[in-house]
Amino acid sequence: MGKNRLEAFSDGVIAIIITIMVLELKVPHGADFRVLLPLWPVFMSYVLSFVYIGIYWNNHHHMLYVVQKVSGGVLWANLHLLFWLSLTPFVTAWMGENHFQAAPVAAYGVVLLMCALAYTILARVLIRHHPENHALAEAIGSDRKGWISIGLYIAGIALSVPFPGLGFAMYVIVAIIWLIPDTRIERRVHR
């Protein structure tokens, strides 16, 4: 089957995820900037999660760009990714509302880790479904950046219990690593 419905559905779910996250930002009572100060953890959580959702949307788009068809396995792998992404608004709000306490920061890391694993699974299922598509297989390659990210998520989760700030910092580092667009697929396609 074609990939258009999968792309459209995924884009819709991601748009809803972002909408839910922004709706969690409550307007403070008061008209001066001091009323914004207590909201900084909520806002910082939102910014980081928005960046993560943007990274997944961007990379998902690039990965699907080089494939022509999808299978039932691809659909389920994609739903698996969307499931974990859909938990992002919950852990984002929990972490922000509780000012980066240990359990919410660790839970946030678990969701990020599961998103990364689900994305890796989706990439591998797509490669298996398209054995003739050398551009996709070569672009993904060993996915060193992805495996480094998974290691940093695990470290962030472990650090979150004794040092929530360090756990959060690990998640920021992974986001920075991925903020630089992953051009592996684009380079292969334009060759």
Image: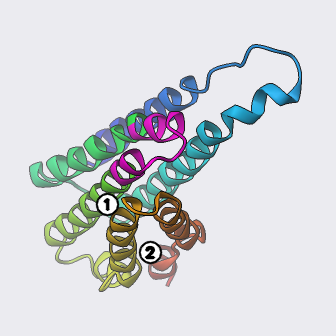
> What residue is drawn where x is 33% and y is 85%?
138
Q: Residue furthest left?
A: 72
Mark 1 and mark 2 lie on one chain; the one further toward the N terminus is 1
Whether residue 158 appears in this view of the structure is yes
Location of residue 59 in the rendering, given as x and y in whole percent from the top left corner: 45, 61
Q: What span is in magenta?
A: 91-107
> What residue is drawn where x is 54% and y is 70%?
173
Q: Nearer the viewer, mark 1 or mark 2?
A: 1
Disc 1 from disc 2: Cα separation:
23 Å
Quadrant of residue 126 within the rendered picture:
bottom left
Q: What's the mark number on residue 52? A: none
Would you say 172 lies left or right of 128 here?
Answer: right
Q: Which residue is mark 1?
A: 113
Disc 1 secondary structure class = helix
Q: Which residue is mark 2?
A: 185
Quadrant of residue 33 within the rendered picture:
top right
Where 30 falls versus 149 (above or below)? above
> What residue is drawn where x is 18% and y is 53%?
77
Q: Residue furthest front?
A: 162
Location of residue 166 in the rendering, given as x and y in whole percent from the top left corner: 51, 66
Where 68 falls versus 134 (above or below)? above
